[in-house]
Each structure stands twice: as C-alpha cells, then as structure tokens.
Image (cartoon, grey):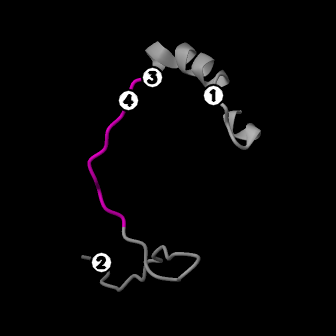
Amino acid sequence: MVNISTINHSYPHCYRCKTPLIYRGISAWYVKVEEVANKLVKNNAEVNWVPENIKD
C-alpha cells in the first residue's frame, strides 16, 4: 500500500429541502411500444387534450 487517506465525496441533496437524496433499486416494468407506435400516435390525435399543447 502506498497511501492511506480519507476522501470526502459530494453527495446529492434535494434543491428544495436540502435533505440527502437516497438512490435505491426498485422493480420496474418496461413496455415495448415499437409495434404499436403508429397506432398510439393516431389515437393521440383523437384525444381532447387540455391544455391543447400537451398532445405535442
């Protein structure tokens, strides 16, 4: 061993309340949409979005 020292790492904090952020792994679902992408876009045009700019 050449050197023994303490290293202080920066840790992410919430910009609003300044509390430490905790990263944790969670289970997740992923949906493959390539096969239905065109249908989703077509159906999106038929939805009454409020406000209007949401559908873009």
Give the residue type at disc 1. Answer: Val
Q: Is residue 55 above or below residue 14?
A: above
Residue displayed at 70% across by 42% down: 50
Q: Work out which quarter of the rendered image holds the C terminus and state it.
A: top right
Residue displayed at 46% across by 82% down: 19
Compare marks 1 and 4 and give the one earlier in the sequence: 4
Determine the secondary structure under disc 4: loop
- Which picture quadrant has residue 21? bottom left
Give the residue type at disc 4. Answer: Val
Compare marks 2 and 1 and give the one earlier in the sequence: 2
CB contact under 8 Å: marks 2 and 1: no
Residue to which mark 2 is pinned: 2
Image location (x, y in percent) of residue 22: 37, 70
Residue displayed at 38% across by 29% down: 31
> Would you call the spot at circle 4 few (<14 residues within 10 Å), some (14-19), or many (20 or more)?
few
Q: CA distance from mark 3 to mark 2?
A: 53 Å
Within the magenta stretch, is there residue 31? Answer: yes
Give the residue type at disc 2. Answer: Val
CB contact under 8 Å: marks 2 and 4: no
Q: Which residues are magenta?
A: 23-32
Residue to which mark 3 is pinned: 33
Q: CA distance from mark 2 to mark 1?
A: 66 Å
Task: From the viewer's side, name the closer residue of 34 and 6.
Answer: 34
Q: Work out which quarter of the rendered image holds the N terminus and state it.
A: bottom left
Image location (x, y in percent) of residue 8: 42, 83
Determine the secondary structure under disc 2: loop
Q: Which mark is residue 31?
A: 4
Residue to which mark 1 is pinned: 47
Task: From the viewer's side, name the closer residue of 2 and 33.
Answer: 33
